[in-house]
Amino acid sequence: MALEMSERFPFGENWTKFLSVLDEGRVVTAECSLRDFLQSEWLNGRTFLDIGSGSGLFSLAARRLGATVHSFDYDPASVACTAELRRRYFPDDARWKVEQGSILDADYVSRLGRFDVVYSWGVLHHTGSMWRATENAVSAVAEGGLFFIALYNDQGVRSRVWTVIKRAYNRLPRILRPAAAVPYFLVLWGAKSALDFLRATPFKSWRSYRSKRGMSPWHDVVDWVGGYPFEVAKPGDVIAFFRSRGFNLAKLKTCGGKLGCNEFVFERTRR
């Protein structure tokens, strides 16, 4: 059953606010994240598809590493964010295309063609039909190409509880949502912040958070609490899904059974 728009989290609005804190340091951190996980210093001569581009940060990182980039997102505000980064850093660049589209639209995806690198970090589990979205995304990977994907870890009952929380959050009047996010900020950051103070290094974890992917901790908290639709997957199920479709696992980083995303890089060996 299709979700009401009021139940969907407005990811683009959150990323629009994130652009106000985006700086060169965050962009460089995003570049390093791509280099590390793709095990490649540069992407010169390679095509890069960013599925669910969000803020546009990783499309920008890929473009700065030399790739020819195609970015798309379902959320018009996210498309606008990505287009704004293109305007700031690569105005009128023929090697970076930004458009609105849905990964659930198989016809749309088929028209995009095949890419050397397909990137979708923390996106497909928010479509309302995660495995169908993943199936469509797989079709865009060229033979010998890479798929860098991150999906929420399945924590069993805890994941079911978070589903209820996220649905309830999105049913609140928008004016109440920031206040509703504060308790979950304390859940996610309270222990780390307290430990920093005990070590006489206040806010160290908060300040160093950008070292992970260049993102903003507060905007990620809001994204986490509000992120709905919400689906999860166990690493083994993801690996089995890709192997049955002609992919080998090239790299894996799990969240250790905790809250968060498991990250995978798969290489396509056959179609």
Image: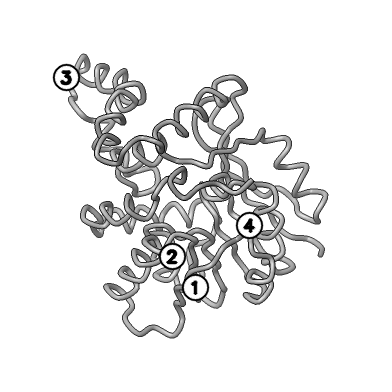
Are the residues tagged 4 and 1 within 8 Å (C-beta)? no
Residue at numbered disc 4: 147
Mark earlier in primary sequence (3, 4): 4
- The x and y percentages for residue 18 are 28, 52
- Mark 3 → mark 4, Cα distance in angstroms: 42 Å
Q: Residues within 10 Å of mark 4 (few under 14, many from 20)?
A: many
Which dot marks residue 200? 3
- Mark 1 → mark 3, Cα distance in angstroms: 44 Å
Mark earlier in primary sequence (1, 3): 1
- Mark 2 → mark 3, Cα distance in angstroms: 38 Å
Q: Quadrant of the N terminus?
A: top right
Query: What SS does tag 2 mark?
Result: helix
Q: Residues within 10 Å of mark 2 (few under 14, many from 20)?
A: many
Horizontal arrangement in the rendering, residue 202 relative to residue 211 (left or right): left
Q: Which of the pair 15/74 is nearer the observer?
A: 74
Q: Which of the pair 33/84 is nearer the observer?
A: 84
Mark earlier in primary sequence (2, 4): 2
Residue at numbered disc 2: 59
- Mark 4 → mark 1, Cα distance in angstroms: 14 Å
Amino acid type of the residue that numbered disc 4 sits on in the rendered structure: Phe
Query: What SS does tag 3 mark?
Result: loop
- Mark 2 → mark 1, Cα distance in angstroms: 7 Å
In the rendered view, tell whether residue 116 sits above or below residue 247.
Answer: below
